[in-house]
Every structure is written in structure tokens, then in C-alpha cells.
Image (cartoon, rainbow, N blue to C red):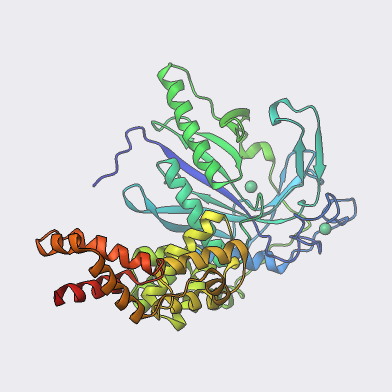
């Protein structure tokens, strides 16, 4: 099937990834863990760009950028350098951003995602290192703000900016790209994507191969989809009304769900890129192979391994590997119990209950899941009770054994079911007659009676078997 794209929607992304797993900022010794700190406390003269300070490049930032490049199946530029991107903005202490220009450390990569019509390869044009400016807080909305505050804690944070080709053809594909990218980056342990603003995207959107408009600084994956959809609609609307689109930069207002014009797009010339005279050219050739050798297993590879090693379905493998912590949880559980059972418990039940409660995977551990699943397997509790135990554990804490005891979930003994089946058959002459006359449904009535006697704590399949055995005797 050929994907239909009559509106010629083209979406390219520029994704800024904050390397918050690096211990220190890009050019000084300040901590990268600033989000829970007082404003303007994670600072030094260096990241404030006070006169007389010079940057010292941190090795970590470079290693992380190389790691990202290798994970994106890209080429690593062995000789690379830094430029000054000049512009005035109050959050930029030194009046320029340190970034890369014509020799980005990473180029020509790709990520394969699930597109609207099957696999889609999104090409990565480049990825470069740069530092983050401080943060402005606008009072009210950005276009009608009465005042602005500055927090420099973020100033000097190491970033990698990943630039794609315009290979996505819908907002949904852009979102899937970001989901996949985030998953890869978290596997690499270079970013904690749950921290606000750690992964931000600019989207370049055009329709009918017309003028390209950039929507800046979209901070969540959900917002990316909304912003792009809004932008596609706005552009088509403009064209239908005979208006000309201008090449511009727009801002997505998450509260109002619209994009608004910020400025007419600047070009590279406007930034007067100069080689950064404080930083020497960087030769990374001697560290690439070491980093390659230490690369972790990435989502796609793990997914394929799960399918072949554990004989689980591709859908389960996909669900389990989207987050590394989930994949690890599954593998711990699968050490002790049948992998297929483990996959359906972890991917379907556990993941579902965690998502429903918006809880992280760390809210549950492998031994607890193993205990629950083993109790179900031994028929000590029913499968429904197993799920109830998991829910209680997530809501109130405790151990599976304690919960089973306090809620009285232990299943009744087999001989109790046998007795109950005998009684149920004896007490239901009409249903028995109906069943004998060929009304299959009558069986359910009798089994229901057994379950009632066991107060639901019987294995329904066993109850059914016992009832059938009794009926055969008649
Ligand atoms: Zn600093
Ligand atoms: Mn940038």
C-alpha cells in the first residue's frame, strides 16, 4: 500500500536533548541536577559568563554526544569544533551560545519508526553539541507578558541538538519519532526524560510543498502532536483563503492550543557564527571505539532478542522494551517463571495498572510479581484475585502474602468444590433437566451456584469440571 499524502505534509524536527545525566554542566563544574534547587543557586562565574572566565570542556558531554551518534546509526566526525552563535537575549550571559557549525560531531544517521503505513526511516541530518541558556519566566503569556524573571541554573547545561530531514508526514509520525528517540536516549542513560524541559522539539511544518514554518520549543510529546496538527490546519486554511504564508517562527501556546507568530525567521547569517576562540578544535578519534564497545543493548535489538530468546509475541516484546526499566523487570520475572506467562503479566497486567495510576515502574519489584504469579499457578488464588492483590499492593503497599491473608483470597480446597458441585446439582433439578435436554446454558447456572458456595474463591474451570462429572453420574 502506498501511503497517501495528498496534502504533502512534511514535518522535520529539531530536538534539543538536555544531557542531565552528565554530572556537571558543559564548561564548568556546576551540577546538572538543578531542577529541585532554588532558582539561581547552581551557578559559578563560568556559567554566568562573568568577565575573565574561560570554558573548560567536560569529557562527559562529548562522550554522551558520541554515544547518541552511534545509537542513531550515524557517522561521527572525528575532528570537530565549536562556534559562537551570536544573539542578544537576556537569558544568555555572554551574548552568544556555544554551538557547532559546519562540522557537527554527528551526521547522517537514521531512526526507524512505525509510520502510518509500516516502517518509516527518518533520516537524521546532524546532531551537534551546544550549551543551554538560562531560563526566562514570563508573567502571563509570552506575547502579553507584563514582566520577565531570569533563572540561570540552566545556563551552561550540555545539550545535543538532533536535526532530522523532513521525513515525517503527519503529527502522529512526529510523535512516534519522539517516543522512539526518547526510549533510545533513556537506554543510553544520557537523559532523564521525565524532567520538565529535558527533551524539547522545534517542528518545521509545510503543506503542499510550500513555505516552511517553524514552531519553537514544544516541551511535551503530546504537545508536539497538537502543535503540528494545529499548524497543518492553519496553513491549509491560509492557502484556501488565498493568503500567502510567510517563513516565520511561531510559538505553541499549550493553554490555548494554538501557534502564534514570534518573529520572521532569521537565517544563519544573522547569527554571525565565529569559531569560538576559547575552545580548541576537538579530536575524538581515539575514543570512538571504546564507546562503541561499551554501548548498551538498544530497544530494537532487545525486542528482537526477547522474541527469539523467550518465544514471546512481537507485540509483547515491543511493549516490554519501550522502557528499559520494564524490560529489566520482565527479565527478572522471566528468570523464575515461564517467560510467556511473565510477558503477559508484566506487559499487560502490570503495565496497565501502573499506567492507570500514573506510577513509575519502580513502584513494583520482580519478587512481588513472581510471588503473585506463582500463587495463581499453584491455584492458591484465582487469576482475578492475583490482579486484585497487585492493585492493593500498588494502592496500599504490603506483601502479596499479607494481602491474600487479610482479604481472605485463598482458594477453597478441591474437595470443598467437589462437595459444592454435588450440592448444586442436587439443588437444581430444573437446570439439570434442561441440561440433559440439550440446553447448554443450564450448566452455567449450576456452576454459578458452586462459585456462590465458594464465595468466588474457586477456580471456575475446576468447578465446571466437577459439575460435569456429577452430571455424568446421573
Ligand atoms: Zn558553573
Ligand atoms: Mn539549538
- 239 vs 44, left or right, is left
Where is residue 405 shown, x and y percent of the image? 54, 74
Question: Quadrant location of residue 3?
Answer: top left
- The residue lying toward the viewer, choosing from 387 and 234, is 387
Residue 189 against residue 359 in the figure, above or below: below
Q: Is residue 144 left or right of residue 356?
A: right
Q: Is residue 65 above or below residue 329?
A: above
Q: Nearer the viewer, residue 352 or 98?
A: 352
Q: Position of residue 66 (x, y in %)?
A: 59, 66
Q: Residue 186 at what x, y percent from top left?
A: 57, 63
Of the pair 438 and 111, the residue shown nearer to us: 438
Classify residue 377 by image quadrant.
bottom left
Residue 147 higher or lower than 378, as above or below:
above
Q: Position of residue 50 (x, y in %)?
A: 88, 51
Would residue 228 be visible to someone looking at this image? yes
Residue reaching furthest right?
52
Residue at coordinates 55% horizontally, 67% vertically from top-left?
187
Q: Is residue 387 left or right of residue 160?
A: left
Closest to the observer, 413 or 323:
413
| Residue at figure coordinates x 62%, y 56% from the top left | 194
Instruction: Work out which quarter of the rendered image holds the C terminus and state it.
Output: bottom left
Amino acid at each position: 500500500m502506498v501511503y497517501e499524502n495528498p496534502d504533502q505534509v512534511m514535518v522535520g524536527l529539531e530536538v534539543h536533548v538536555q544531557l542531565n545525566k552528565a554530572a556537571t554542566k558543559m564548561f564548568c563544574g556546576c551540577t546538572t541536577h538543578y531542577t529541585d534547587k532554588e532558582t539561581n543557586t547552581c551557578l559559578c562565574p563560568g556559567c554566568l559568563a562573568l568577565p575573565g572566565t574561560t570554558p573548560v570542556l567536560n569529557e562527559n558531554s562529548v562522550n554522551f554526544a558520541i554515544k547518541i551518534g552511534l545509537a542513531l546509526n550515524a557517522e561521527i566526525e572525528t575532528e570537530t569544533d565549536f562556534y559562537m552563535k551570536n544573539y542578544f537575549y537576556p537569558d544568555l550571559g555572554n551574548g552568544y551560545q556555544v554551538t557547532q557549525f559546519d562540522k557537527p560531531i554527528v551526521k547522517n544517521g537514521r531512526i526507524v519508526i512505525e509510520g502510518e503505513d509500516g516502517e518509516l526511516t527518518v533520516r537524521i541530518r546532524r546532531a551537534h553539541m551546544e550549551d543551554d541558556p538560562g531560563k526566562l519566566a514570563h508573567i502571563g503569556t509570552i506575547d502579553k507578558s507584563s514582566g520577565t524573571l531570569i533563572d540561570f541554573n540552566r545556563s551552561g547545561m550540555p545539550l545535543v541538538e538532533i536535526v532530522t530531514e523532513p521525513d515525517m508526514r503527519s503529527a502522529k509520525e512526529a510523535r512516534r519519532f519522539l517516543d522512539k528517540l526518547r526510549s533510545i536516549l533513556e537506554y543510553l542513560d544520557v537523559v532523564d526524560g521525565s524532567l520538565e524541559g529535558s527533551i524539547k522539539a522545534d517542528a518545521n511544518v509545510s503543506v503542499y510543498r510550500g513555505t516552511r514554518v517553524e514552531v519553537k520549543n514544544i516541551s511535551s510529546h503530546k504537545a508536539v502532536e497538537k502543535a503540528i496538527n494545529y499548524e497543518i490546519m492553519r496553513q491549509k486554511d491560509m492557502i484556501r483563503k488565498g493568503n500567502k504564508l510567510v517563513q516565520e517562527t511561531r510559538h505553541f501556546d499549550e493553554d490555548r492550543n494554538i501557534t502564534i507568530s514570534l518573529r520572521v525567521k532569521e537565517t544563519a547569517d544573522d547569527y554571525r557564527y565565529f569559531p569560538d576562540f576559547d575552545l580548541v578544535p576537538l579530536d575524538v578519534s581515539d575514543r570512538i571505539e571504546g564507546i562503541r564497545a561499551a554501548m548498551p543493548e538498544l530497544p530494537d535489538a532487545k525486542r528482537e532478542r526477547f522474541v527469539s530468546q523467550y518465544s514471546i509475541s512481537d507485540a509483547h516484546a515491543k511493549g516490554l522494551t519501550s522502557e528499559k526499566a520494564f524490560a529489566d523487570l520482565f527479565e527478572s520475572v522471566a528468570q523464575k517463571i515461564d517467560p510467556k506467562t511473565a510477558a503477559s503479566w508484566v506487559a499487560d497486567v502490570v503495565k496497565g495498572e501502573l499506567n492507570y495510576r500514573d506510577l513509575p515502574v519502580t513502584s513494583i519489584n520482580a519478587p512481588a510479581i513472581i510471588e503473585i504469579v506463582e500463587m495463581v499457578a499453584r491455584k492458591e488464588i484465582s487469576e482475578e484475585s492475583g490482579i486484585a492483590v497487585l492493585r492493593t499492593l500498588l494502592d496500599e503497599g504490603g506483601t502479596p502474602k499479607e494481602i491474600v491473608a487479610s482479604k481472605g483470597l485463598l482458594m477453597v480446597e478441591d474437595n470443598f468444590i467437589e462437595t459444592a458441585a454435588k450440592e448444586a446439582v442436587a439443588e437444581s433439578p430444573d437446570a439439570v433437566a434442561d441440561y440433559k435436554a440439550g440446553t447448554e446454558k443450564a450448566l452455567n447456572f449450576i456452576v454459578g451456584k458452586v462459585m456462590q458456595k465458594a464465595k468466588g474463591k474457586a477456580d471456575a474451570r475446576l468447578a465446571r469440571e466437577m459439575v460435569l462429572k456429577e452430571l455424568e453420574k446421573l
